[in-house]
Image (cartoon, coloured by chain):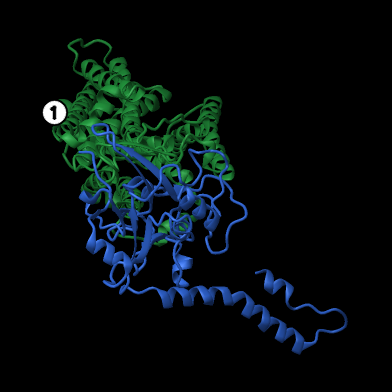
Chain colours: A green, B blue
Amino acid sequence: MKSVRYEHLALSGRAFYVLLAAVGGLAGIGLLSAWAMEHRGHWVTGMDNQIVWGMPHIFAIFLIVAASGALNVASMGSVFGRAAYKPLARLSGLLALALLMGGLSVLVLDLGRPDRLIVAMTTYNFKSIFAWNIFLYTGLMAVVGVYLWVQMERRFQHLAGAAGVVALVWRLALTTGTGLIFGMLIAREAYDAAVMAPLFIAMSLAFGMALFVPVLIAAYAAGGHTIDEALIRRMGRLLGIFVAAVLYFVAVQHLTNLYAAEHTGVERFILADGGAITALFWFGQVVFGGLLPLALLFGKTRNGIQSRVLTACLLIVLGGLAQLYVIIIGGQAYPLQLFPGLEVTSSFFDGQVNTYTPSLYEIMLGLGGFGIAALITVVGLMAMPFLPASTALGAEQAEAAE
Amino acid sequence: MSNFEKAPTCETGPVNRRRFLSGLIGAGTLAVAPGVTLYKYAEAAVSSKVRWGMLIDTSKCKSGCTKCIDACATENGLTSKDRPRTDAQWIRKVDLRDSKTGRTQSLPVMCQHCAEPPCVDVCPTGASFKRADGIVLVDKHICIGCRYCMMACPYKARSFVHETLEDQKPHAPRGKGTVESCTMCVHRVDAGGRPACVEACEAAEHGAMVFGDLNDPKSEISKRLASYPSMAIRADLGLDPGVRYQGLGGGR
């Protein structure tokens, strides 16, 4: 087996500064938005006592589940023995760390008291899945850190397989925990279902892959290299399977809910009467985020595979954000059923469908999470040798494997 | 501590050691006393032998009457910023109408002080907690403002403090960026009193709210619960709320 040579991302001075200014600026605007929200109070956002979680949570959860999915390629190489993916494991780990840090930053910066992060890190209620998630998130950072280290340190490379298995198990636990944030909410009819856990695992596989492929292609393009088409086709097919899995679990989620008469109200709201929520579900999530990417990824034409996969990735990311909007906002917009079967009115908006208009602050904070993740990725790629010098090796081994 | 800053003063000349020390002790006592008093309250009052609860007779609760809400706001210093979507509401009046029969009812809804509170289960730091006597509270010192408890509460009983507060009541501390809800006027209960809403309802001669110990069979609330049918909101969830309703019915 040939040994793989890894390279730093080599950007010319000007390109480096432009890129750094772009991603750093995005991260900076996010931080400024967070400061404004904390300083003035959350009333300046679109969130209120009815819609208590908003845009920051959509972005944060997207980034966190995508972080887990960014490890797909590493897992395929180390755990499932797919040789073609092995050289890309380092990039996979770096992207996972970057996305996780981006997502967690948004989550923490949206807290009412982000200054009490130390309280969250030292005072636990172990009955709370949130408390478990704090361990799962910080633990994944440590696990991926060790995984990257054993890959890069020649003396410990024999441990890479074991570290890969730990990382795989850990990330499955992490996405299970993230799904259960909603799955364990007995109060809200749109949640309170065990299917949330496998749904979030499938979402993580799709979203993470949909971010990994463009980052890989961009990093290679920046270095003046191109990636072997066979590898892109392979990753595209894998991505397609993940997208199909998401659609499957979404169908299970809604069909099982529809079966129970008590939940037909919330299902009618999401699937038919919810206005923007319904439109986002059918067009954002299902058509543009699911069916169209499937057609692009499994289409018969063999030409332009790279642009088709990249388009599919973009659609999956946007569809994923739409899906989280439908889950998080849709689930809260539908009123809590305190008195089933009765018409309810109050000064606290009981019985009403809650509206949500996100402010620029929370959108910028969410995008800032992407900025932080991109900043860490760019700096990481330039500082350390994460990129294999050529994916031709990957292609060779891909053929050997097929 | 402002007491420490002010106490050891000396007008002129060298420091008088005796005055300095006595001042220091005085200041220390002043600083610690409120904490000790609160600690004594907490230690002395809380016992799992009692379970505080409330019974609301919806047939006596008048639609449009907001005496209980006004009393709660005054007692706990809940001021409105004229932003109804973000203003805190610890207690609210809910009007119900059965579309099949046309029957209407009005009733106050607040934290139901569940025996199995979902807000306590989901709170990552343990800031949401239930006292031994059944009162569910938020420890404002360790609440990080994640709002998971608000997602988890089936009664929509909690509010997030969305902006800076002024003129707070010393017995009901609140804080921007933390979550809060009905405390069942714990400061009154610990001093042997009743919640402000219950007293206001009684003063208005409606008598729709009864407060007492659910564990004491001789208490008025227990006697009423034993004599008349009552129910909990969303009893199907099995949370065993401490707030019960009499005369509530209709719907599916």
Q: Nearer the viewer, residue B3 or A376?
A: B3
Q: Position of residue B202 (x, y in %)?
A: 44, 59
Q: Quick one: which residue is furthest to the left in this view?
A: A402
Instruction: Return the residue nearer the eye: B138 or A288.
Output: B138
Circle 1 residue: A400
**Residue at 16% across, 39% down:** A80
Residue A114: % across, % down:
49, 50
The type of residue carrying mark 1 is Ala
Q: Quick check: A201 left or right of A124? A: left
Q: How many marks?
A: 1
Q: Position of residue A383 (x, y in %)?
A: 46, 40
* Residue sitting nearer the eye, B67 or A344: B67
Q: Quadrant of residue A248?
A: top left
Which residue is pictured at 43% across the width and 50% down the height?
B91
Q: Quadrant of the C terminus of chain B?
A: top left
Q: Residue furthest front?
A: B205
Q: Give residue B1's position: percent from left, percent from top.
A: 65, 69
The 10 Å Cα crowd at callout 1, few under 14, some 14 to 19, many 20 or more, is few
* Residue in the foreground of this view, choosing between B70 and B42: B70
Q: Is residue A385 visible?
A: no
Give the answer, above or below, for where B233 lies relative to B28: above
In the picture, residue A311 is in which quadrant? top left
Q: Residue at x 71, y 86 (%)?
A: B22
Residue A340 as seen in the image, left or right of residue B28: left
In percent of the image, x 26 and y 45: which residue is there?
A: A171
Does residue A329 show up? yes
- In this rendering, is residue B46 above or below B53? below
